[in-house]
Amino acid sequence: MQLRRTQNEYPLLLSLPPLMSRTTHERIAQICFEHLNVAGLSIFERPLMQLFSANAVSGVVIDISHNYTDIAAIVDSEVQKASVTSVPIGLGTCEMYLAHTFKRNAAILKELNSPEPLSAEDLDLALLEVVRIAWAEGRIQVPHVEGSAPPPPAEEESAGIEDIAAIMVSGKEKAIIEAAAKKKTTAQEKKAAASAAEKERQALDLIDIEFDFTPKGGEERSYKVTLGKERHQLWEPLFDPTLLSRLGPALPEELKTQLEDKPLGVQEAVRGSVQSLEGKDRAAAWDGIFLTGDSSMKNLEPAFLSRLNPYLTRDPENGTQSQPIATRMLKLPEYFAEYRDKGSEIASFLGACIVAKLTFTDTIGGGKAFITKTEYGEKGPTAIRDILP
């Protein structure tokens, strides 16, 4: 069949992980021009796009994915290759850790195994579902932070008597009054007991999670699980990977092998990333920390600051003016209202949109930040090397 390829009139900008080889970039260029038939191609490193979305050109980007946390320091719009590192712990790892913590709670197991016990596999899946729902609802916070606010108090029940005339005619007003007084006393006692129970729940930081779960080969069940303060341990392995040893045989072999190398906590990895830079560049890198990826967690940013600031104040080289004594968390600007509501998970997309608008114009970039189809036809895949950092 004589089929003609559709002419793509639009250029393409790709946001890729750092440290990819030249050969990989050339292969990507070949696919884009020869298969996708793009009009132009530009490639930037993902951490840089993420930082640009926060309206910054220097800082440290922490990208939390499902299984890994990637860290990169950027100085004056350039990703510092020596600073790029990765911690083999992500949101999925933390979820697995917290699910294992819940598995040691007899009360939670009792609720999940009623009315019929779940298989070991279904129990693990149900516990992960509990963790994910609690995380999605914002019921999990940083360790040592108070839990969610208690629900508003219920309205007072009316103790009034509706049909006074009927009572007077019947001559039972005394009995009715005594019964009403007794009812009021009972209601007050119940209210006091409920208030005491609620205060106890608040003190114990208890919450209820309701969800539906379908065991393999079974019917859908509805559950109501009560969680305590242990739910706030979700992110602890990110800062202290040694805690994952508690999983024992439940720890995946791949992760077990990686943990044998004693990976650093993310705060230590960030410090190591910045320390890999030359002295004059460290202050610029510490200018701001941008947290992105699967990290839309209440109070997670303050937790990073509280763990990073001590490294600044205790740094032996901190006596020079080139080293700051504090850092700050970078956020998406207020004027990106529609993106702020979605969190920083799409920061790479937002940054790439901004850069693409500037790159593929005649006045800015001048073809230096991207290659055209004509240039690719003249040089082949190696043309992409002209625009790589």
Image (cartoon, grey):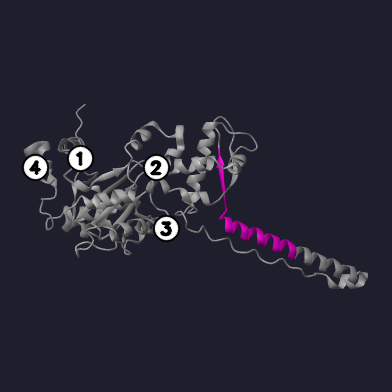
Of 321 and 283, the residue lying toward us? 321
Of tags 1 and 2, the one toward the viewer is: 2
Q: Which mark is residue 375?
A: 4
Of tags 3 and 4, the one toward the viewer is: 3
Identify the residue under disc 1: 20
Residue 252 visible, this angle: yes
**Start and end of the magenta stretch?**
188-213
Q: Earlier in the sequence, mark 1 or mark 2?
A: 1
Of tags 3 and 1, the one toward the viewer is: 3
Quadrant assignment, res 255: top left
Dominant secondary structure (helix, strand or loop) of the stretch shown in magenta: helix
Residue at image position (53%, 52%) is 229
Which residue of the protein is positioned furthest toward the top in this rendering? 1
Q: Which mark is residue 299?
A: 3
Q: Amino acid at mark 2?
A: Thr
Element at badge 2? helix
Q: Earlier in the sequence, mark 1 or mark 4?
A: 1
Q: Earlier in the sequence, mark 2 or mark 4?
A: 2
